[in-house]
Image: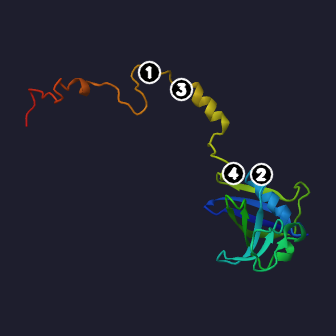
Amino acid sequence: MAILKFRAYYEEDDAVYRDVVIKHSQTFHDLHNAILKAYEFDNKHQGTFYRSNDNWQRGREITLEKYADKDYRAEPLLMADTTIGSEIRDTNQKFIYVYDFVKNWTFHVELINVTKEESSKINYPATSRVEGIGPQQYGTRSLLGKKFVDIEEKYDLPQKTEGFSEEGGQAESESESEIDNSGEESIDEGFDE
């Protein structure tokens, strides 16, 4: 049985990608779920794959379901009924994967390896490599996660600590005290021009 390794690049940043290994007999629905899991997305939204060429042009559509509000050039294939092996045309086959048609998350999915060695330790499909910090499906993601917020709150300074001013304000300094009552700067008498 052939094991296929796909690299799913986040379209906005090709340094962010996830490698997914999957059996050639599994479906695009399995690949859809594997990519979502690898990027920590939920599976509550619409999604579709497009067969693609080397220039990332969209070809035949392999969709989660046939959407009534979408115009199709050709009748789409359904993810649940389409095996991955049936859509592999060459050794570096490419697909475009679009998830959540409102947010329009787009991933470039490329076949990077084919092997016959199935591992008994792996439950296919599986994520075999994670590179870069992926996009956050809802909101923003901190590099340190929730722990950072706790640290930040613990070390926040109390209001008006000596030597610190309000945010955006300026602490009183010697240069401010050198301005006389008329608003003009006082000139040091020992200053040479």
Q: Which residue is mark 2?
A: 42
For image coordinates 81% across by 76% down, the residue present is 88
Q: Kindly indicate whether the residue at mark 4 contacts the one at mark 2 (C-beta within 8 angstroms).
A: yes
Does residue 112 show up? no
Check residue 137 in the rendering and tell me which mark sits there, or answer none. 4
Q: Quadrant of residue 31?
A: bottom right
Q: Which residue is mark 1?
A: 160
Does residue 18 show up? yes
Check residue 181 in the rendering and tell me which mark sits there, or answer none. none
- Residue 193 location in percent, x, y? 7, 37
- Residue 107 lies left or right of residue 126; in this view the side is left
Which residue type carries mark 4?
Gln
- Residue 133 lies left or right of residue 158; in this view the side is right
Label 4 Cα neighbours within 10 Å, binned few <14 / some 14-19 / many ≥20: some
Label 3 Cα neighbours within 10 Å, binned few <14 / some 14-19 / many ≥20: few
Label tally: 4
Q: Quadrant of residue 33?
A: bottom right
Q: Kindly indicate whether the residue at mark 2 contacts the one at mark 1 (C-beta within 8 angstroms).
A: no
Q: Name the N-terminal-most of marks 2 and 3.
A: 2
